[in-house]
Amino acid sequence: MKNKRYEIFENMLEGVQVINNNWQYIYVNNTVVEQGKTSKKKLLGKTMMEAYPGIEHTAMFKKLEKCMATKTHKKILNEFEFPDGSEGFFELRMQPIDEGVLILSIDITKQKRLEVELRKLNEYFENNVNERTKELVVALEREKELNLIKSRFVSVASHEFKTPLGAIQ
């Protein structure tokens, strides 16, 4: 099922798919195939529900329906679970067209994983900083106590030596 009208999208870095008003895939580029870990044969001519059972119950599909019904563009961050159980994150931009809707997908899975890793590292460092701060507060209190004891000792020693030194003079 070769669609010459959309050939310009074939080698784009972004995924491009065209869904008609009957929810059938009428065009997908090579990037969509890579992003979806699938083949054009498994998508073209099939409805979204046939290709991805249960998709009609997702937030993404609700946005797609609204885009198609109101003829307004939509943007969504979509978390996608592949048949093999792995996850992917995609920024989807849905644009109504005469045939139905054109979806532009950008794979942001690496970015999302890095964000999670960064969040974990921030928590780790924050915990370390809090722990170290507590240790420093305890050390500072000990230091204050030692300085107070030293000050008292000097005061007592000074007082105790003052009388004998006065007598010696």
Image: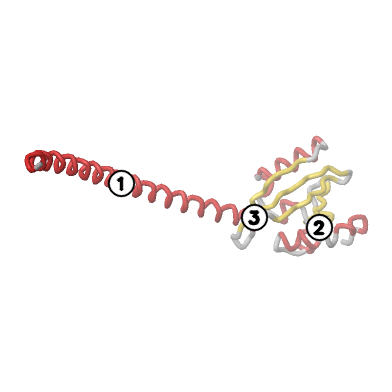
Residue type marked 3:
Gln
Spot the residue most to the right: 4
> Disc 1 or 2, which lies upstream in sequence?
2
Above-or-below relation of 147 to 111: above
Residue of label 2: 28
Secondary structure beneath disc 1? Answer: helix
Q: Where does residue 128 sit, x and y in percent of width and height?
A: 42, 52
Q: Categorize mark 3 by other alpha carbons within 10 Å: few (<14), some (14-19), many (20+).
A: few
Residue type marked 2:
Val
> Residue at (89%, 58%) from the top-left corner?
8
Q: Quadrant of residue 57?
A: top right
> Disc 3 or 2, which lies upstream in sequence?
2
> Residue at (61%, 57%) from the top-left corner?
87
> Residue at (21%, 45%) from the top-left corner?
150
Residue of label 3: 111
Q: Quadrant of residue 9?
A: bottom right
The numbered dot on residue 138 is 1
> Residue at (80%, 53%) from the top-left corner?
17
Quarter placement of the C terminus = top left
**Rounded to the nearest whole Å, what is the CA distance between mark 1 and mark 2?**
63 Å
Give the foreground label among 1 and 3.
1
Nearer to me, 128 or 118: 128
Quarter placement of the N terminus = bottom right
Secondary structure beneath disc 2? Answer: strand
Q: 96 left or right of 134?
A: right
Q: 152 left or right of 129?
A: left
**Rounded to the nearest whole Å, what is the CA distance between mark 1 and mark 3?**
40 Å
**Would you say the residues marked 1 and 2 are in contact, meaning their CB atoms lie under 8 Å apart?**
no
Q: Where does residue 43 sit, x and y in percent of width and height?
A: 77, 59
**Rounded to the nearest whole Å, what is the CA distance between mark 3 and mark 2?**
24 Å
